[in-house]
Amino acid sequence: MKTISKIISFKYSLLFLAVLCSLTIFTQYAQACSVPVFRYALERWKPDAYKGIYIYRGEISEQDQALLDQLNNASRAEAALNLIIKPVNADTFSKDKLTEFFKGPIPDKLPLLAIWFPGQMGKSPPFLRETLTPALAAKLVHSPKRQEIAESLINGESVVWVFIPSGNKDKDDSALALIRQELELALTKFKKNPFTILDGAKRKRLTYGFPIMALSRDNNAESILIKTLMMSEPDLFQHTDEPMIFPVFGRGRSLGCLFGEYITKKNIDEAATFLSGACSCEVKNLNPGVDLLMAAPWDYVVMNSFIEDEPLPELTGVLADFEDAQVPVAPSDFDSAPEKPSPKENDMNLLVIYGVTVAGVILLVIVLGVTISQKRKSK
């Protein structure tokens, strides 16, 4: 009887461990996802890279080569720019091949700099097609408003709300008043019950801030920022007579755009609540938004982590992941972003991982139980 009792006790102990293991997995996942979206994005989501080509015929001039070096060096700097450029000789490719790659005609006048949104190279037309000049290179690397956005996020602001006025004073004043009112209400709500973690013997509280930054469409120094915002969603240029607001969070990621009639109490509150609520998924591509072209030392400044039980990312430039997978010279060989799985597919993946773990432990319980039982019977 003592032997049978030990076998039963052993089997139940294994079953208990299996349950404990599965609960631990789910608990760790829940803890990771309890961090507000804006904070998780700041600490963990590296900016997606904009990729481009400098297309030329013959040879690259010394001035243009110096400008290309300037851009590529900016992508490796401490305040890294999420942009990588490769030179492409148009003489080595057929016109049809280049036209297909550009999704449109190739200008007769070369050289030309073409840049695509992250993951869109070879899939859609480039958002920028211009002659490479010192002025353009400087604008790509830096602008005052982009620096202001980065500094605000690095210094602890939750979301920077970039407001682009329409030029109609009544419309703009009304929209801005509503945005300010709703953001103040949202801040009051979040500050009452802030996200906290245990830091040693003390409780560390996350701060909240929703600054509004005005950005004129006529600001030439900010032409790159305006262009990326306005082309981050289809058809926004059709609504330039309406005021627009873009919530920017994390490491310079724009959640989307609210304009005109869509600037409502409900929509502003939903955007603020989503960004300040628990992170629904650690996988960046499953969350809405598009990263802006921006240079900032994200990895070097995000030291005060609010994510428990996870190491901080290595202190490397934002384009380190591309060092071994640089954009090849042949346009047909450009690497593209993987297909984004749907939320349903992600949930299924999680279920598979947890299910396999639990099933494996339970199977071990059964096998060990049967083995021990057979040994007992054979005696």
Image: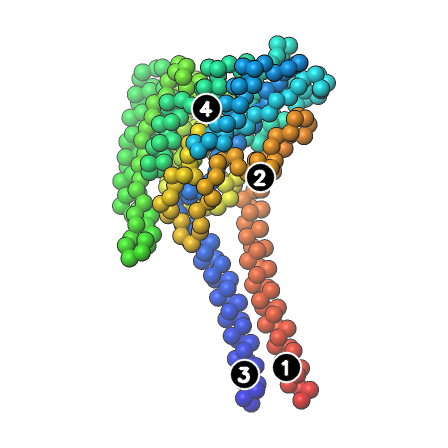
Gap in angstroms between the C-alphas marked 2 and 1: 49 Å
Q: Residue 161 location, x and y as percent?
A: 36, 30
Gap in angstroms between the C-alphas marked 4 and 1: 71 Å
Query: Image check: 293 left or right of 324?
Result: left
Return the mark for residue 340.
Answer: 2
The residue located at (58%, 42%) in the rendering is 341
Query: Image check: 208 left or right of 366?
Result: left
Q: Earlier in the sequence, mark 2 or mark 1?
A: 2
Return the mark for residue 6.
Answer: 3
The residue located at (41%, 14%) in the rendering is 220
Q: Residues within 10 Å of mark 4 (few under 14, many from 20)?
A: many
Return the mark for residue 141.
Answer: 4
Q: Residue 129 location, x and y as percent?
A: 56, 17
Q: Residue 311 location, x and y as percent?
A: 44, 50
182, 96: nearer the viewer = 96
Residue lying furthest front: 62
- Tag 2, which secondary structure? loop
Return the mark for residue 373.
Answer: 1
- Tag 4, which secondary structure? helix
Tags 3 and 4 in contact by the CB under 8 Å rule? Answer: no
Query: Image check: 206 left or right of 333?
Result: left
Circle 4 or circle 1, nearest the eye: 4
- Answer above or below: position of 283 versus 26: above
Question: Tag 2: residue type?
Answer: Lys
- Tag 3, which secondary structure? helix
Q: Earlier in the sequence, mark 2 or mark 4?
A: 4
